[in-house]
Amino acid sequence: TMLLHLPAVLTPAQCHHLRTTLSDPAQRRWQSGRATAGAQAAALKHNRQIDPTSPGYAAAAALIRDALLAQPLYQSAVLPAQLTAPMFNAYGAGEAYGLHVDAAIQRSGSTGLPLRTDVSTTVFLNDPDEYDGGELVVQDLYGCHDIKLAAGDALVYPASSLHQVLPVRRGERLASFLWAQSLVRDPAQRQSLLDLDLSIQSLRQTVGDGADLQRLTQLYHNLLRQWAES
């Protein structure tokens, strides 16, 4: 199961801009997080989300999307075919989201058509010392992973995993989240492609291009050609 930490997806200035937007009543309207949860998840979800009809939402969402897509490691790990529109949430004292799995189907942010949720991403918008609790806990075969990242950092993890946000005890936790449908449906195949791509990049830095590296690059693209969905 892939848990991938992407540091500095957003600059400090971008984080400050987004926090300012989220705190400005003229730019955002909060709604209950239950508005976008399924029947089972709604009973577990106690947070607030930005109403996507808010004046500042579209620009804030575009900032998140563009910043993620500009990350080579995100592209390599996720191989995104489609993304949902990024959303924004807040957890204050006592708010939490119980153990759940993400819905398998969402809507594409660009086409509005159904999208299969292969990969989840959470982008943290404020630093861990600004709130107590609020850890994102992701379960996999190796146990439970409690995660709180610096403002601007992102966590990429399987949408198929059980996960939760623990109750916030002090302060407020701000984040953005979205889902991707990958060109490669199978997570083990995506992991193999990521490992191969990272090895190719490392070898290019240490030994330079050569016949062996060209064969590895050929292997990468032929596997991607074999596994990718149209």
Image (tube, helix red, strand yellow):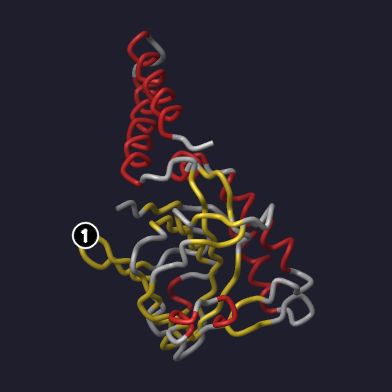
Residue 126 in the figure: left or right of residue 186: right
Q: Which x, y percent locates residue 198?
A: 37, 33
* Residue 76: image location, x then y, percent: 46, 39
How dense is the environment of label 1, judged by Cα within 10 Å: few (below 14), some, or many (20 and up)? few
Q: Secondary structure at mark 1?
A: loop
- The residue at which mark 1 appears reads as 141
Expressed as whole percent of the image width and height from the top left, the position of residue 90 reads: 55, 79
In this rendering, the count of numbered labels is 1
Residue 79, position as x, y percentages in the image: 49, 41
Asked if residue 11 is positioned above or below residue 183 in the image, the reply reads: below
Which residue is rendered at x = 42% and y = 60% of the image? 159
Q: Residue at x 37, y 35 (%)?
A: 193
Above or below, 140 relative to 201: below
Camera-nearest residue between 189 and 27 = 189
Q: Quadrant of the C terminus?
A: top right
Q: Residue at x 41, y 23 (%)?
A: 222
